[in-house]
Amino acid sequence: MLLSEIHEKVNSYKIKWRGHATQRLNQRRITRSNAIHALLNGDIIEDYPEDFPFPSCLVLDSDENDLPLHIVCSIGQDFLWIITVYRPDSNRWENDNKTRKR
């Protein structure tokens, strides 16, 4: 998946929010606008080409409050699917929020 594909879907409002993503946004007090901002400004840090039903990726950026944000998303059926959104956990991620701890 390419960032240009993500940007095209966001800019054309072809976004579907999975129920899990919506639930997590509410639980974690993250807004959809935070997620959209991250998708338009972030970087893909991991690819999951074997994910089902569509290949997915992990995007990292900071939100408007400069807090790190991870978004797992995929493209399929002409939509960008938002699978989940979360703040990286310092117990699982290095300080750069790009590298998983071993």
Image (cartoon, rainbow, N blue to C red):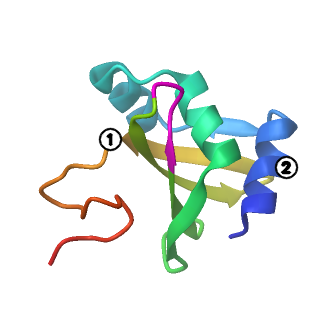
Give the mark toward the camera: 2 or 1. 1
Asked if marks 2 and 1 touch (Cβ < 8 Å), the reply is: no
Residue 68 in percent (x, y) is at: 40, 42
Give the magenta-colored segment's residue range.
61-65
Q: Secondary structure at mark 1?
A: loop
Instruction: In this rendered view, identify the residue nearer to me: 40 or 77.
Output: 40
Please name the residue that numbered disc 2 is placed on. 8
- The disc at residue 5 is none
Please check the rendered image and state whether residue 93 is part of the magenta-colored stretch, yes or no: no
- Comparing 89 with 50, the one in front is 89
Q: Position of residue 80 (x, y in %)?
A: 69, 48
Decide whether residue 62 is among the magenta residues: yes
Please tell me which residue is depicted at 34% across the width and 19% down the height of the picture. Answer: 29
Secondary structure, mark 2, is helix
Return the residue at label 1: 87
Cα distance between the residues tagged 2 and 1: 24 Å
Instruction: Examine the rendering and report whether any part of residue 53 can be seen.
Output: no
Quadrant into which the N terminus falls: bottom right
For image coordinates 63% across by 34% down, the residue present is: 37
Q: Main secondary structure of the magenta part?
A: loop
Q: Amino acid at mark 2?
A: Glu
Please determine whether, in this image, residue 14 is positioned above or below residue 1: above
Please state the horizontal and vertical placement of residue 97, each as a whole percent of the image: 34, 58
